[in-house]
């Protein structure tokens, strides 16, 4: 910050202005230094460094204790409920309509409160509109907030309110000095005359997955075990059993056709929930040249350096991610691909990783009603570990069984299941739903995992930064099959780029030129050249770059392939480096962004936008 010079007005002041964030119901604080100097640099700048904010807090001696807590929290990452909230909030509804929300925390907390809101049927995305708030009572670790459903109904007058109530519990952890936040939660009530009771609610979904030319998978979850069914056009498919988690495949559909669908869920004859109507479009038949567009973005994890707390919601940069998925939807894409680092992860707490992935699904959920999201694993998603003492040293080892990173990912996400198969009895991590492929029209899409065994057993070798062994052989067969089917465009996705340009030149698939990584990387790239891959898409580096990889990079590369790095969806940005192939980099930007790829026959183009919709780059890829 420029100091005030003699002769200049020294009437400088801090201004704290609460402003509503993009996630409805969220608040963030913006601090601006206002000087009366002559230059723009002297007159205003955002204070984004934690140290600068802490030093200025000392000047706020007259502020109330709660405002001090609020301001301090704005500079710190939010803690995942898995680490801070001992139990999930419990909701009870009395016959007179009084709702009690109760939760516990592991540490002493202050400022506990719950916001309540509703959605409107005419809202395309069904986003919450918070209108009521209740302060919690109780001791420092047990919190209870109450609201009357009659007050909810009063503020809902004149709307198409449907009995679903959103709520969001927050409190400030005095030990960790972070805001604990449940995110948007849901309950539903029934009223018969003047009597109220709890009804079944859909707390996740419905969302689309694995849309093909003749089928779709629809997934949802309810707060209590329920029966359910999906209605797609004139077809109806029931979910199996009485459960909370539901997945239903609807087949027998027509290619490239638009369908409306809804979900019914119930626990009894007088408690049946019927969702609003959503829609989707099946893919064209394989090999047909129907034009389409798809989206790619990556590294949606939280940014711990941001001064805006809401950006770090349970391991996800929810504010940026929500803006981007809505922007993607408005570009009328058919699906989106996210190759890794969905969450902050990197934890020894498996439940924390699960909750972060659920926060990710909540954030994209309003758009996932209409388009599927195909996801891949990144290093932050893959590093779920235990500790083990080896030769007197404490080392990280991968968790096993249901707590293994790949198992958590497979359980929480829904992707195709045609990846490499492991031998019976193998103790290797699964490839299921983190390595896979699918067709869309005349194009073939392949998701790989070059963070496989990101943390390996002491007796095993990590495959982080490599595509080798069983995965490489599977890829070889998959590309041969796509070529035999004469798919005109092939796109390949993996998290860590083959030719990093900014932030991860020291690792990725290069490791500053280490032959142990360069040799398998070049073998992979020659295979991609052989099958005429149009482009690869990666994240890991928190920026955008477009690089033409051809014989100028390595003389063994027989044809040019575009490498697109698209890691700018919320993680802290990386500036550009100077790797050996820097002259082949055709575009670079550290800005937050997403990519839209258009396909029309053999023509492929890319457009890159920031979250506000401003164009960053455009090019023909083929």
Image: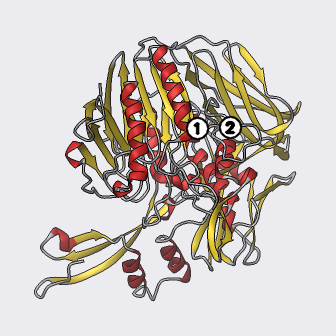
- Residue position marked by numbered label 1 in the rendering: 470
Q: Coloring scheme of the render?
A: secondary structure
Q: Residue at x 87, y 51 (%)?
A: 95
* Left-right relation of 608 to 431: left
Which of the pair 385/301 is nearer the observer?
385
Q: Name the quadrant of the C terminus.
A: top left
Q: CA distance from mark 1 to mark 2?
A: 9 Å
Percent of width and height locating residue 7: 10, 86
Which of the pair 545/255 is nearer the observer?
545
Classify mark 1: residues with Cα within 10 Å, few (<14), some (14-19) or many (20+): few
Total residue callouts: 2
* Left-right relation of 70 to 501: right
Q: Are marks 1 and 2 in contact (CB under 8 Å)?
A: yes
When the figure is inspected, residue 519 is found, relative to residue 209, above or below; the finding is below
Helix, strand or loop at label 1? It is: helix
Q: Name the quadrant of the N terminus.
A: bottom left
Disc number for residue 422 = 2
Query: Which residue occupies the extreme left position in the image?
Result: 7
- First in sequence: mark 1 or mark 2? 2
Classify mark 2: residues with Cα within 10 Å, few (<14), some (14-19) or many (20+): some
When the figure is inspected, residue 73 is found, relative to residue 375, above or below; the finding is below
Which of the pair 273/587 is nearer the observer?
587
């Amino acid at each position: 910050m420029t100091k005030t010079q003699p002769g200049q007005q020294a009437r400088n002041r801090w201004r704290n202005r609460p402003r509503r964030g993009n996630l409805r119901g969220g608040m963030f604080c913006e601090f601006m230094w206002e000087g009366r100097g002559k230059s723009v640099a002297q007159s205003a700048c955002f204070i984004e460094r934690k140290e600068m904010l802490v030093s200025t807090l000392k000047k706020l001696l007259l502020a109330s204790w709660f405002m001090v807590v609020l301001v301090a929290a704005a500079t710190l990452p939010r803690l995942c409920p898995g680490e801070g909230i001992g139990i999930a909030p419990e909701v009870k509804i009395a016959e007179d309509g009084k709702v009690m929300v109760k939760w516990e925390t592991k540490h002493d907390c202050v400022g506990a409160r719950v916001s309540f809101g509703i959605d409107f049927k005419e809202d395309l995305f069904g986003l919450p509109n918070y209108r009521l708030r209740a302060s919690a009572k109780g001791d420092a670790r047990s919190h209870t907030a109450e609201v009357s459903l009659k007050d909810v109904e009063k503020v809902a007058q004149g709307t198409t309110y449907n009995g679903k109530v959103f709520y969001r519990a927050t409190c400030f952890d005095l030990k960790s000095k972070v805001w604990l936040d449940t995110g948007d939660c849901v309950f539903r009530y029934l009223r018969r005359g003047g009597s109220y009771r709890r009804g079944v609610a859909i707390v996740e979904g419905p969302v689309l997955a694995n849309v093909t030319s003749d089928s779709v998978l629809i997934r949802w979850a309810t707060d209590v075990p329920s029966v359910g069914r999906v209605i797609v056009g004139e077809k109806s498919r029931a979910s199996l059993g009485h459960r909370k988690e539901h997945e239903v495949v609807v087949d027998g559909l027509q290619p490239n056709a638009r369908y409306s669908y809804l979900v019914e869920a119930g626990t009894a004859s007088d408690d049946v929930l019927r969702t609003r109507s959503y829609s989707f479009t099946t893919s064209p038949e394989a090999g047909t040249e129907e034009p389409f567009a798809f989206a790619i973005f990556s590294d949606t994890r939280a940014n711990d350096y941001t001064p805006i707390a809401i950006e770090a919601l349970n391991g996800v940069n929810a504010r940026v991610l929500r803006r981007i998925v809505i922007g993607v939807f408005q570009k009328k894409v058919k699906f989106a691909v996210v190759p890794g680092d969905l969450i902050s992860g990197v934890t020894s707490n498996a439940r924390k990783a699960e909750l972060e992935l659920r926060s990710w699904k909540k954030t994209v959920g309003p758009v996932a009603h209409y388009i599927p999201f195909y996801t891949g694993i990144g290093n932050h998603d893959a590093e779920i570990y235990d500790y083990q003492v080896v030769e007197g040293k404490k080392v990280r080892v991968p968790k096993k069984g249901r707590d293994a990173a790949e198992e958590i990912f497979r359980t929480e996400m829904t992707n195709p299941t045609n990846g490499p198969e492991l031998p019976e009895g193998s103790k290797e991590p699964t490839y299921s739903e983190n390595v896979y492929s699918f067709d869309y029209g005349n194009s073939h899409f392949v998701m790989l995992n070059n963070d496989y065994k990101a943390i390996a057993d002491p007796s095993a070798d990590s495959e982080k930064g490599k595509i080798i062994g069983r995965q490489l052989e599977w890829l070889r067969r998959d590309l041969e099959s796509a070529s035999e089917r004469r798919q005109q465009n092939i796109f390949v996705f993996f998290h860590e780029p083959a030719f990093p340009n900014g932030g991860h030149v020291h690792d990725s698939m290069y490791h500053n030129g280490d032959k142990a990584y360069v040799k398998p990387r070049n073998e992979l790239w020659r295979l991609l050249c052989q099958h005429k891959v149009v482009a690869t898409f990666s994240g890991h580096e928190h920026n955008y770059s477009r690089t033409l990889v051809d014989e100028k990079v390595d003389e063994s590369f027989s044809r040019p392939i575009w490498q697109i790095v698209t890691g700018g969806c919320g993680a802290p940005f990386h500036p550009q480096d100077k790797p050996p192939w820097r002259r082949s980099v055709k575009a670079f930007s550290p800005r937050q962004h997403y990519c839209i790829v258009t396909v029309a026959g053999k023509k492929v183009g890319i457009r890159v936008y920031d979250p506000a919709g401003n164009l960053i780059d455009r090019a023909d890829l083929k």
